[in-house]
Amino acid sequence: MKSRCQAFGKLENAGDRVALILFPSLEFYVSLFGILKRGAVGIPCLPLFGPEAIEYRLTRAEAKMAIVTEEKKNLIDKNMVPHVISDKELLKLIQNESASYKINTSAKTLAMIQFSSGTTGAPKPVYYNHEAAALTTVNARLCVNLREDDRYFCTSSPAWGCGIWYGSVAPLTFGTAIGAYSGKFDPETLLKALEHFEITNMSAAPLVYRMLRNCGKIDTFSTIGSFLPI
């Protein structure tokens, strides 16, 4: 994994803006951490977005490269993004690249451009520097109660801030194993995964708990200590 991330970093220049239109997968994490190591800028996008939503984000963020699912590749206009690589092409493309180069980033290096959900108008870009990793690590410890020996699962898509920082980056600063949901959400699949992977800590939006409650596999949910609006 580490060598693949290093090799991916060879594909772009520091400061280049790279769109990630992928579900959580080996290709996604190779791309994500390769971008961060290189000092490029990630633009995570949900693969379920339609062409207009993807075009808006890539154009607004001035993307120079897009890593996409095979199904989405033909939706990306080369006049909009010069370099488009599918997830099926990615690992083959980097297999002969050197896995070694000098990393040159700082806390103030721009790391990510994510877009708001757009509930109050057009989606707005949110800019994160590398120092966001340190800030979210504190919150992961104090608010999520994350521990090194946890098996942690975050149901949020990495297209959103929670999925990237609390679901991907912050847990790895502790060396904590992480789980993520890939594809269209199904509550029964999630319940099976939580049991199979022996998850000990999970973060999810209230909507997820409502779907779990309504799937018919659990009779009773209870919570103590604070209000949970499900």
Image (cartoon, rainbow, N blue to C red):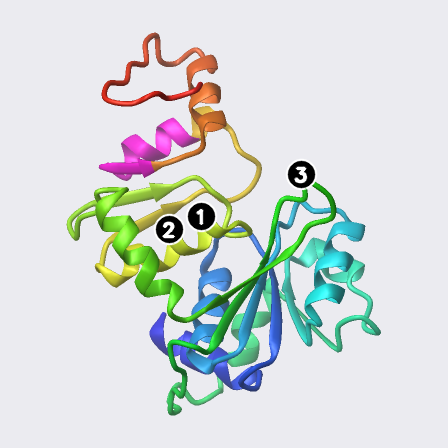
Q: Quadrant of the N terminus?
A: bottom left
* Cα distance in 3D space between marks 1 and 3: 17 Å
* 197 in magenta: yes
In front of the other: label 1 or label 3?
3
Q: Dot 2 corresponds to which residue?
A: 166
At label 1, counting other C-alpha atoms closer than 10 Å, the crowd grade (few under 14, some 14-19, many 20 or more) is some
* 116 in magenta: no
The residue positioned farthest toward the front in the image shown:
120
Q: Dot 1 corresponds to which residue?
A: 162
Mark nearer the N terminus (1 vs 3):
3
- From the top left corner, tell me how far across and down residue 64 is, in percent: 69, 76
Q: Is residue 191 left or right of residue 54?
A: left
Q: What segment carries the magenta color?
A: 190-202
* Cα distance in 3D space between marks 2 and 1: 5 Å
Q: Residue at 29% across / 35% down in the picture? A: 196
Three-letter amino acid code of the residue under disc 3: Thr
